[in-house]
Image (cartoon, helix red, strand yellow):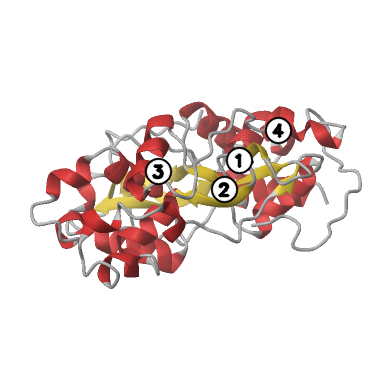
Amino acid sequence: MIKINRHIENRNDKRFIKQSMDRGSIEFKTRIPRQESEVLKIAGKNVVTIPSSITIIGAAKTMTRYGYRRLPVADPGSKKLEGILTSMDIVRLLGGGDSFKLIKKGHYGNFLKAINENVSQIMEKNVVFIPSDASLKEAISVMVSNKAGGIPIVDKEKKVVGIITERDILAHISELISSQVVKDVMTTEVTTISTSKSIDELTQMMVNKGFRRVPVVENGVLVGIVTATDVLRYLGGGKAFEKVVTGDIKEVIDVPVSEIMTSEVWSIGSKSKISDAAGKMDSKDIGCLPVIDNETLEGVITEHDVVSQLLEVSK
């Protein structure tokens, strides 16, 4: 049984067109754009893009500076979409996936040389996107089916004109699922990590299990949460460089999770409405809430869980 730390807040208060999709009407009741082109009204239109020639560390710094978890990669001249870089790509680079080979084999473990490679080495090139005239239902369907937290929006010439994220959707239509409660959609089999585990072990866990967020537990007590964004900030914010002496990657990833985790954790009860969970994630700018009942961790609910449920209620 995992208890909640009393110091932790506990209030119950890539290409879209992989195949054609139905553009029929959606039965969402309120706040949903009736004109399909109005999906851009929900999406972020002042989108920041990066060229594929930017260095990995340069991209990580840009993402950290703007507070973004993903950046479309576009040709600097034509603005045509070429790929996308996400915080999970940084996780894979630092030990959890195929991108780690760039460090281990491409540069024989030299961290500094690897992060000065072009971002094209680790970005997702087969990027999922939606056209600017897509309906919101299509956007949600693409995000859910591809397990994507955000997708670029392009015009007819494949130029990037916006990006829509799970957070954008939650901010506009969370009231549509007000009749359902958190326990209906939360994940109950929660994988956790301890504060003493290394960043190396964390990144491997995230990639192998497909997690972007992992609760941190010590002696049965929930003491924090660590996310792919925390890993991104570790690199983009410069803290990783404080560990470098010889330049070997082990100096960067053999560091305890406690050094990058977030200790302030917002939570919610299992009997709370899903709309309340969505509202809290939106207002606190977080993507996940541990579900706490009687000071015990019962599960987690994420932005993806809520957005997936929106698709279910529209059927």
Tell which of 283 and 120 is nearer to you: 120
Contact, CB < 8 Å: mark 3 with mark 1? no
- Look at the numbered disc 1 and give the secondary structure of its residue: strand
State the count of labels: 4
Q: CA distance from mark 3 to mark 2?
A: 18 Å
Q: Earlier in the sequence, mark 4 or mark 2?
A: 2
Q: Earlier in the sequence, mark 4 or mark 1?
A: 1
How far across and down, in percent of the image, does residue 285 sit? 48, 31
Marks 3, 2: nearer the viewer = 3
The answer to whether residue 194 is visible is no
From what the image shows, is residue 196 above or below residue 137? below
Q: Which residue is mark 1?
A: 165
Q: Earlier in the sequence, mark 2 or mark 1?
A: 2
Q: Residues within 10 Å of mark 4 (few under 14, many from 20)?
A: many
Q: Which residue is mark 2?
A: 149
Contact, CB < 8 Å: mark 3 with mark 2? no
Q: Amino acid at mark 2?
A: Gly
Q: Residues within 10 Å of mark 2 (few under 14, many from 20)?
A: many
- Look at the numbered disc 2 and give the secondary structure of its residue: loop
Q: Residues within 10 Å of mark 3 (few under 14, many from 20)?
A: many
How far across and down, in percent of the image, does residue 81 sit? 62, 48
Marks 3, 1: nearer the viewer = 3
Q: CA distance from mark 3 to mark 1?
A: 19 Å
Q: Which mark is residue 2?
A: none
From what the image shows, is residue 32 above or below residue 120? above
On screen, residue 168 versus residue 4, left or right, reads right
Q: Which residue is mark 3?
A: 59
Q: Which residue is mark 4?
A: 173
